[in-house]
Image (cartoon, rainbow, N blue to C red):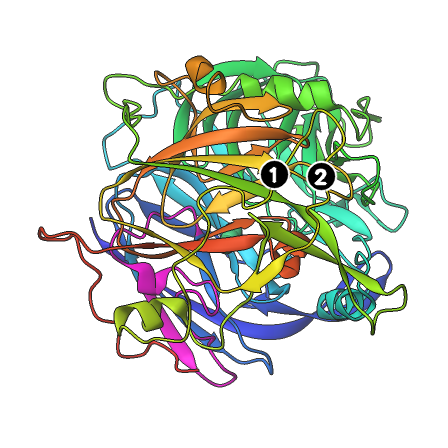
Amino acid sequence: GRTRHYKFNVVAKNFTRLCSTKSIITVNGRFPGPTLYAREGDTVVVKVANHVQENVTIHWHGVRQLTTGWADGPAYVTQCPIQPGQNYAYNFTLTGQRGTLLWHAHIMWQRATVHGAIVILPKRGVPYPFPAPHKEVVLILAEWWKSDVEAVINEALQSGLAPNVSDAHTINGHEGPASGCASSARDGFTLRVDQGKTYLLRIINAALNEDLFFKVAGHLMTVVEVDATYTKPFTIDTLLIAPGQTTNVLLTADQGAGRYLVTASPFTDSPLVAVDNSTGTATVQYTNAVSTSAIATTKLPPRNSTSLASQFIDSLRSLNSKQYPANVPSTVDHSLLFTVGLGVNPCPACPNGSRVVAAMNNVTFMMPTMALLQAHYSNMSGVFTTDFPGQPPVAFNYTGSGPNNTQTMNGTRLYRLPYNASVQLVLQDTGIIGPESHPVHLHGYNFFVVGKGVGNYDPTTSPSKFNLVDPVERNTMAVPGAGWTAIRFRADNPGVWFLHCHFEVHTTWGLKMAFVVEDGEGPNESLPPPPKDLPAC
Ligand code: C2O
């Protein structure tokens, strides 16, 4: 592959949305940020220069980063932040992956505005395993807050309560024609299509805190890829996408010449959770349509359409072809069960005496003040421990009344894995405040989603129903509310790898942990020394 160089200048810029103007942090003055294009096998060097008054890091979400953990990006996990006035060059190779991913800031809530697409084309001359589209288009779904996003979360941390939800959903940076504020059609994204042609939509959910349903009025979509892995094609009229996930669909302009509304609307399986009920919109416009013709609209799925959501998730399968086989680990060396959920801890200083916290296996993860990967690489003691519990330390129950396991312990605990260990990890939702689905993301790996269920995971009966043949392969899974999801992966990437809920509010509350994966013995099986420009804390 060749080497592609990008320059990301992190700068503040004014944007007007929802009828008002505010300054936001951007890359190169753009919202959403620039698309990073490369081919499978290419090396990418992105020089990030911080020109704002806040610390910055960028994460390449879903990029495997094989032995390039120093380029992964989460603040205090793989690197100290890039401080105001500093630079850092992220240098990584796109090995064994092609499809759509996203990049985003990975510190505090900065990714609200600092995000963009990664498009990895197949190697030159290698076709897609589906009919070649006429054109490709990136669609980034996100949110817009009228107030400053860092202020939103800081206020919530002080009160101990849930933060405000966003004020609008956006598609490619715009709230779209359906919002009262759009002064003209230019205020929304328009995808122009030629009648009869097929388009590849690369859909990304870059939102901080919401699962989204995505629809195009009057049209069906064929899913062909998720999280940069090919899937068995299936056709739907509504797709579900969680924060951090990407989905490629084929859409054929097979309807009458006209204009059709594109919608992004919220999904939650919890009646207790506040969501932004706005609909982000865009337009599909046939090139032979009269531009003043009325926009055909669509019926939105209700926000609590749990069966529609699980139907979509259950339809996902790996392509598992000769060229793209699903190499599911058939044996398991480490069988782990982590509970994930929210609880309430006492907080004498908070207005109502308690605060919301989140935990995995009752550990509320505390971020260190230096990078875990640096501490691991240089054998520094006192930064983290490796006693993260592999099994729930407190009994849980989701079919009857739950035991009172809201009390969590704080810790910077990691789970140690030998190189190449085969891992099975079951994530069980145990929300005490109320069950809620969690999009959980693992850095540095793709995993196979081998099983999923409602209620309690049963280690004796549940595994017999696992799909070890063609389970979907991805980097961000949906753990259903009051249910569980099982994944398998091989620990073939040495380093420190973050596992966390991709609802940023849950990560902030502590729903995160990290694996430390040991070096192997062979060539290219160990973590190289840190790059010279790695920021210091
Ligand atoms: Cu997309 Cu740790 O994040």
Residue displayed at 79% across by 28% down: 304
> Looking at this view, is 156 or 184 the one in front?
156
Q: In which quarter of the image is residue 251?
A: top right
Give the numbered dot on residue 51.
none
- Up-down: is 160 above or below 533? above
Residue 108 position in % (x across, y down):
61, 66
Residue 355 position in % (x across, y down):
78, 61
Question: Which residue has dot 1 on it?
Answer: 395
Q: Tell me, yes or no, whether the two marked residues, 1 and 2, touch with CB atoms within 8 Å.
A: yes
Main SS, magenta region, reads loop
The answer to whether one can see residue 200 in this image is: no
Q: Viewed as shown, does residue 214 lie left or right of 122?
A: right
Q: In which quarter of the image is the C terminus?
A: bottom left
* Secondary structure category for the residue under label 2: loop
Residue 163 position in % (x across, y down):
79, 58
In the rendered image, residue 83 lying in the magenta stretch gets the answer: yes
* Secondary structure category for the residue under label 1: loop
Give the numbered dot on residue 403.
2
Residue displayed at 53% across by 30% down: 485
- Up-down: is 242 above or below 106? above
> Looking at this view, is 194 or 419 the one in front?
419
- Crowd around label 1: few <14 · some 14–19 · many ≥20 (10 Å): few
Residue displayed at 68% across by 32% down: 481
Residue 26 position in % (x across, y down):
59, 67
The boundaries of the magenta stretch are 61-90
Q: In which quarter of the image is residue 363?
A: bottom right
> Tag 1: residue type?
Ala
In the rendered image, residue 407 lying in the magenta stretch gets the answer: no
- Crowd around label 2: few <14 · some 14–19 · many ≥20 (10 Å): few
- Up-down: is 341 above or below 487? below
Which circle's residue, 1 or 2, is located before the other in the chain? 1
